[in-house]
Image (cartoon, rainbow, N blue to C red):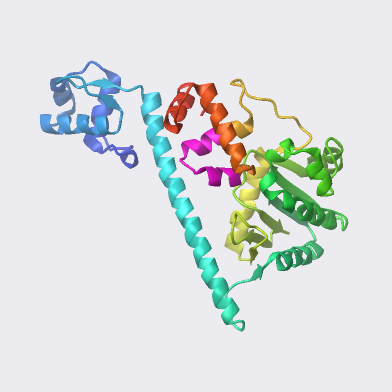
Amino acid sequence: MVEKPTLQRLGLDGPTEAVYRAMIDDRRRHIDDLVDRLGLPEGEIKAALDQLAKLDLLRPLGDGTGQLVDPHLGLKSLLLQRISRIEDLLEEFEEDRSAVLTLLNRYDDLNPGDEAGDYAIGSDAVLDRLRGLADRATVEWAAFVPGGTGFASLLAPAWSLEQRVRRRGVSTRTVYTDSIRNDAKMSRRDAGMPDHPAYGEELGDRARTVPSLPVHMVVIDRSVAVLPLDPDEPCKGVIQLSTPGALAALSTLFESTWERAVPLETDIPPNEHGLTPQERELLRLLSHGLTDDVIRRRLGVSLRTVRRMVADLFVSLGADSRFAAGYQAAKRGWL
């Protein structure tokens, strides 16, 4: 009897999933056994076996049913492929969003009397907007600030705005990327930020880090949010949002990120495999099929650093390609 399929989105239709489950129960089954157990025609059984082979869940062997690939590897590989497709869709959405916002901005420039959105264009206008919002904040200033060499020039204004808000007694919480922990102390001095550990002592638990961040963001009093028009050039232009739906989503994103972030003054030891959180995140992003440039932005490091980290992981895993590295990482339980 064929049960209702549950793995259709991974490429297994009803008969294919039924055959797969039957072979998991008993890997030594023959085609005749599968016909008797499942009540399916022999042609459907063979078609299901062919589909399992195409999905790399089964290795064909002669005229028999074949040999199952270890489900820990086969099924995880299908999940990673699905995640990669989802990431591709998100990247396409980000490109579409950027294109739409660019067109809307052009429309606003040509039609200044029409209110289609609340934008600030140019670095001076962006900083003026943020300073104005900082002066009006009454409850909290919550921010994402990707660190690293790629955004070193943004640390000074981000730190200045945070101080501006705190001087008025408003609570601040800022999430940086772990890369800020690796920056030379001179980078912080240039930004007017105190060195570790005084930095951590001054901020306490108000500054935390995570391995990667999706984008620069500020949420003020849970009533206004500011996002960049271009994630790679956050000072080029921003959009200010105040719709309840957008604020609820962005506030939830901030809170979930804050909960898993680590206070800046707390050291982060490697895990049992000797990997830092940043290295684990790099492996995850690689498994999703993201490009080096996107990974660079997410981790808040330079392109050269990403490529060096990837090369080091290849050596540790004994791999000569990203596919091989992903396979070895999954096999060793690093993902």
- Give, as a single range, the part of the protein colored magenta: 281-297
| Residue at (45, 55) in percent of width and height | 92
Q: Quadrant of the N terminus?
A: top left
Q: Is residue 304 left or right of residue 137?
A: left
- The extreme front residue here reads 304
Q: Position of residue 318 (x, y in %)?
A: 49, 21
The percent position of residue 289, horizontal first and vertical second, equals 46, 40
Identify the residue at horizontal 76%, vertical 67% (top origin): 128
**Left or right: 184, with 320 as reference point:** right
219 or 63, which is in the foreground? 63
Q: Is residue 16 magenta?
A: no
Kindly tell me whether residue 141 is visible in this rendering.
yes
Q: Position of residue 196 (x, y in %)?
A: 83, 36
- Would you say residue 147 is visible in this rendering? no
Q: Residue furthest bottom?
A: 113
Q: Quadrant of residue 132?
A: bottom right
Q: Determine which quarter of the picture holds residue 203.
A: top right
Magenta-drawn stretch contains 283: yes
Position above or below: 197 against 134: above
- Count of numbered marks: 0
Q: Residue at x 78, y 64 (%)?
A: 131
Does the magenta stretch mainly form a helix, a strand or a loop?
Answer: helix
x then y, percent, for residue 61: 20, 20
- The answer to whether 123 is drawn above or below residue 116 in the figure is above
Image position of 142 with respect to 199: above or below: below
